[in-house]
Structures are given as structure tokens and as C-alpha cells.
Amino acid sequence: MSDERPRDLGPSLLQEWNVTTSDDFELWTAALALEVMLDDALADPHLRATLRGEGLRAEDAKAAVLSSESTLARVRMAQDEYAQQAHTDQRRPKIWSLGPAKILWLGVAVGLTAGYLTCFVYSYSALSWLLSVMGVAGLAGIVGISGRIVLRRVPELFPITSAGELGRIVAHEDLIGLGNRLDEVQAEIVVPAVQEFIRRNRRLTFGNKLIFREVTGLYQESGSNIIQTSATRRLTRVLDRADSVAVALAGNRGVGKTTAIKSITTGLHSSGGSPTPFLVLASAPANYEARDFVLHLHALLCRAVLDNVGRPSSPGRRRLLRRTFHRLTGIAVQFAFAAAISMLIWGSPDIVAFGRDVADLLRRASGALPGSLSQLTDGRHPAHLLALAILALVPLRVFAILVTAVARTAFAAVRDRTPPGIAALRKQARKQLDQIRFLQTYTTGWSGKLSMPLKGEAGRTWSTQRAEQQLTHPEVVDKFREFATSTARQLEQEKLAGLLVVAIDELDKIGEPEKAHRFINDIKAIFDVPGCLFFVSVSDDAVLNFEKRGLAVRDAFDSAFTEMIRVEHFTLEESRLWITLRLPDLPEQFGYLCHCLSGGLPRDLRRYTIEMVDIANEIYHPTLETVTRTLIGNELRSKAHALAGMADMLPPTDEVTRLSAALLHLKEVDQSLQLVEFAHRIVDPAVDGDPDNPVERLRRHAACFALLCATVLDVFTDDLHETDLGPDLHLIALARQRMVVHPKFAMETIFAVRKSLDLDLTEPAG
């Protein structure tokens, strides 16, 4: 299967132009831009190697992305954004869009060629035929060097940058309609679309031995390995259309709300060409005062502005020293080469004599400037002139490097110059940060003591104190809203970032539902800030507690938040993809195992994957059954102590004592049949117990957990093959999700799974 790039004459849409295409010209230009960027992206060696590794063809990837309506729509929106921006810009020649450094490189290339050509023409009539041939060869080399300098340093002046593009039909930049945003849109839209195609069509591996190629990104989430779910896609839509709203991220603990918030800064949710949002992340406190939390949020925003806005970047001392060393080494090599060539042309066999002649000539030429410069040419042999010209290339090179360095420094100073608005914003942030952290207190005093006869003393103390009056909660809110508004406006005007995003994470830290409810009501006054988007992560457990206590949660949330995004557990496909991105070439059986044990909860999925890697480090190529028994054994030992601890917290009775002892015995069970017997011994599935009885709920929870472990042990054996990996296994993960809140329904789901898989389980008669 070949992954070679097809040798066509250009984008196929250019060759297929006809009258009917002109009926929807805008859609055609979007498709053309997408195809041009696809061709460029698929020429990347790394991406082609990834396609080849998964057994996929570049042509199939191109066809799939071109047929994606969502990708085409995002490209079209990027074209519209660029058209609106470029509508007021006056088109200028390309050379005027170059920076000072590139213009200087052009001057170096032109000066190098012109200087050599002048010297060669002047001395050509006096050169022998051998020196003439050498001179012509040197001229060709100088032209080649100059052309390479321009091609490498100023590629904008050339319609093509490689010989492979000769003879191909190239789309004009006006047809593509993205201008200088082409590379940015390609990186943010096209490349992720190709990567998504690779993920969805990856090569599946099956087997009963734990073997994987490498471990990558297991402890961190980056833009390239974040799983796109329905929640992340909705988050993208919210960021695209929102201006000043407050959004609640709801979901169980560990479902990935924090990851979704942090992914905002990766550009994963940004449309093509739009700047990445500016994120300020704060954690909700377990114990709080509304005024103090708003001050804390204000301080975080001030620090974020001071750390990330308007700070000039420097290359670093070590990098600068390394670059200087490489430059000096290159100049020394070039000088040695030029001196050797010049000495041969000069005709001097002795390098010392050659150096003495050149030094004497330069001393006489610089004796009475500028008239003494004629000493360099008067009566000189043409070969000597050519040798001097070649030798002069080195100081010219040094001069060019110095001029380039000065120009780059000046250009960097102009580029990094902080705009007045940003400078004022940083000054305001520094001032407000000082006001937040300290009270302005000024104390002066003088005290004295005068000893009197008969041990008498007289003294006096003067002190004055001035303290700034503390701001009230409404004043603190107004200060924050004012600074947030100013920050969002400056970031938009200077195009330094997109929306200002303020995220409040871990609201579930507030244990009591009433406090969490009051926390939202106390801080919701800061939400309505122009150009600022607020995210608050809320756990489903907290929402459930609100509803149980009869609070008007929905009404309170409706008044605080514009909309709510629910972050769900991973589906079976999403869990398998998450594991495959971190453990390439992992057999699918192990991905199913981790999904069933974790219930699709990302936090638990990571934990089981790490445990599985640890097993692989201790046992060489462990089998599926070995890994399953090890994971279940670890789970039984940890859960036995946790369940027994829950029993010990109940009012002490004989029933609770017996239940606690039975739960502790669970850690010694290692056979599926024993787990089934344990479940039937502590609860009768056919009898409906009192759901409000804590002892009954604990019994059902323990029985459901034991049945779940027994089912996993029975299913994930060494006899599990590719044909056995069906949708019924996902029901085990669903039972794992329901086990905490609805253990009775979870048990019914497990019974249904065991029945569908023909596992030996006889439910006791009720």
C-alpha cells in the first residue's frame, strides 16, 4: 500500500471547474482552500509516517476530510473572518510586507553578487584563460549562494519553493481567500481533521497478551490526545458564539470537567484564525467568604495579566551563547577557505609571505584615506585583485552579520514595544494587585521618657495612623467587573487573545449543598462582564443533593447561568481511543477491560491503565486473565476496607457487626463463584428492601460490586477473542456507572449481561 503523494497538475477542484461550479462560488473556494491545505498537510513526513503506520492511504484521508461538512464550514468561516479584516486593508507589494531583517538579507544577496561581478568584469581582460574559467565558476557559485539566501530567508518572493511544484497548477491566494492566515487555519482545522481520521480508522490489534509499543502522555492531557466528545464539541460552539455568558459544566467527579476547562488554552476549541482565549482558572474554596473569593479571583486575573500580557520574550543566555559560538566557528572556517583560495590565486607558496604582502598593502592603502585607496588597484596584477576580492568576502560577511544583528535587535525592540493600552493595563494590574494584598498603613511615632527625682518619670507618646477603609462586597465586585472589562477590551483591541475566560473549578469541594447554592448566588454578580466568559464546574452529586433537600436548584441555576454543558462518561469507543493514544498497539481486549472496570469515568480509566502498565513492568507479556485477576484482586482489597469503614460509621447493632465482618472477608475472595455466593448471601435480589435504610443500601452496594467483579472475571479470560467483543460488554460499564447511586438497577443490568453471555448464575427465588 503506497502513501506516495499523487502526481497531479494541481488541486483537483481547479481542474474540475465548470459553469455549474460557479453557481456556488463561495462554497467552491472554501473547498479549494481546504484541498490546498490538505495537500500541504499530507506532504508532512510525520503525518505520512503516521498514516503508513496505521495502514491508511493519504488519498483516503484527503477524500474523508474533503467530504466533512463541519470542516468545510469552519474553513468557510475562517475565509469570512479574513475577508472582513482585509476589507479595509490596502493591498501592497510583497516587498513592503517584509520585515527589516528580510530586506537586509535581500541587500546582502544583491551586494554579494554585484560586488563579485564588478571585480570580475574589471579584471577579466588581464586574466589568463584558466583564471577566467575559475572566475566564471566563482560567479556561478556566488549567484547560487545569493539565490539560496533569498530562497531561504525571503521565500515570500517566490511563487514556488521547490522543484517538485514546477508544472503544477497553483491556486491563486485570492481564490483561497485566507491570506496570511493560511498556515494558522491549516494547523488549527485541517491537521486536526486528518488526525481525527487516523484515530477513527486506526488499525485494531487483538490478542490476549499485554503488549504495547510505548507509553506516551499517560499522566497529562495535551491538545493532540484530548478526546473529542459531545461535551467538547458543544464547548467549541459556546466559545464561537458567546460574548458575555456564564456556563455551568455539570458532571460526576472525575468525568473530565477540569480537562475540558484547561483544553480551552490549547486552541482545540478555537475556530480557524481566531485567537486562543485568555484563561484564568480558580478553584472554589471549601470554606469561603464571597468578598474574599472575589478578591482572590481579582488577584489571579491581575497576576495572569502581568505574567502573560506585554512581556517581551528573550532568547535566553545559553541559547545566545550557543548561537554566537556557531557563528564564530563558521566565520573561522570561511576565512581559512577564502585565505587558501586567495593564496593560490596570488601565486605565493608561503602563507607567511602572503600574509605579509596583504598586510603591507592594506597598511599603505589605509595610510591617507580616502586617496590612498588607489594603492589597492594601481599597477596590480588582475590575479592579485581577484585574490583580494575573495579575501574581502570574509569581512563583508562579518559586516553583514553585525548589520543583521543590529537590525534584528532594533526590529525586536519595535516589535516587543508594549502598546500604550497594554502598558496602562499592566500598570493598573500591578496597582490593583498591591491594593488587594495589603492595606495601606502608615504609622509614625515618637516616644520619650524623662526620669525625675524620687524615681519619678514623665513621658509622652505621639502616634498617627492612616488606614485605607476596607471595600464592601458590592465595591469589590464593581472593582473586579471594571478591571475584567478593561482587560477583555485591551486583549481584543491588540489581538493578543480571544475571549477572556474565567473558570471556577471544583465547586464540589463545598460539602454542604446550602453553602454551594449560596456561593453561586453570592458571586453571580460578577458574571455579566462584556467580552468575558465564565465557566463553573458543578458535580452531579451536588445537584442531586440540592434536589433531595428541596432547594430550587434549577431556578437558581437558571438565574445564574446562561446554559449548562453536561460532561458525560466516555463511551466504549472513546475509552478505547483514549487508551490507544497512550498505549499504541495495545490489544483491544485490554481496552474493553479498562472501560468495564472504570465505567467510562476518565479518572478511573487513567488509574486502571497505569495499574496495567505496572503489571506489564513486573510480568513479561502477562495474559489477559492474569491482568484481570490482578486488577480485580487490587480492587477487592481496597473496596473491602472502604465498605467495612462505611459499616463501622453506622449505629452499632448485631446486624451491622456481622455485615462489617462479611465485608472484610471480601478481600480474601479470588474466585468468581465465591463472589456470586457472597452477593447472594448478603442480599436477596428478588426482595425489594427499604431504599432509605442505610444498612440495606450498603448491602446492595456490596452485592452489586461483588457481582460486577465476578462478571469481569468470567468474561475477560484468555478465551476472549475478537468475535466476543460485542456491545453487551458496554453494559458492564453502565452497571459500574449506576452502582453508586442506583445499586438495585445496576444489579439488574449485571444479571441481564450474565444471561446474555450464558454465564452460570442462578438467581435465588424470592
Image (tube, rainbow, N blue to C red):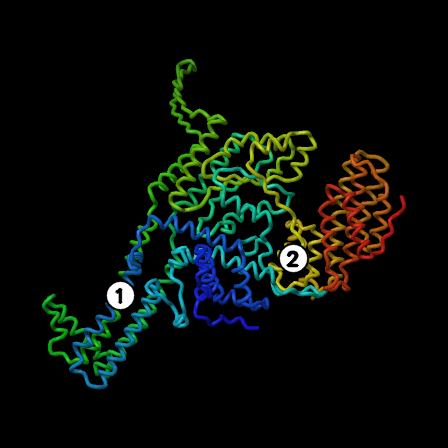
Q: Which residue is more in the foreground, 158 or 177?
A: 177
Tell me residue 762's x, y (percent): 87, 51
Query: How far apart are labels 1 and 2 at the CA level?
Result: 56 Å
Number of residues whose C-alpha sits closer than 10 Å to that of mark 2, classed few (under 14), some (14–19) or many (20 or more): many
Q: Which residue is more in the foreground, 101 or 316?
A: 101
- The local secondary structure at tag 2 comes to helix
Left or right position of 140 against 199 = left
Left or right position of 661 against 124 = right
Please report the residue visible at 42 percent of the width from the left and 14 percent of the height from the top.
456
Left or right position of 85 against 718 = left
Q: Quadrant of residue 167?
A: bottom left
Image vertical order of residue 225 relative to residue 122, above or below: above
Q: Hey, what amino acid is under mark 1?
A: Val
Q: Hey, what amino acid is under mark 2?
A: Arg
Please report the residue visible at 63 percent of the width from the left and 32 percent of the height from the top.
553
Q: How many marks?
A: 2
Tell me residue 70's x, y (percent): 53, 53
Please report the residue visible at 39 percent of the width from the left and 17 percent of the height from the top.
460
Tell me residue 681's x, y (percent): 86, 46
Q: Which residue is more in the foreground, 358 or 198?
A: 198
The residue at which mark 2 appears reads as 576
The residue at which mark 1 appears reads as 108
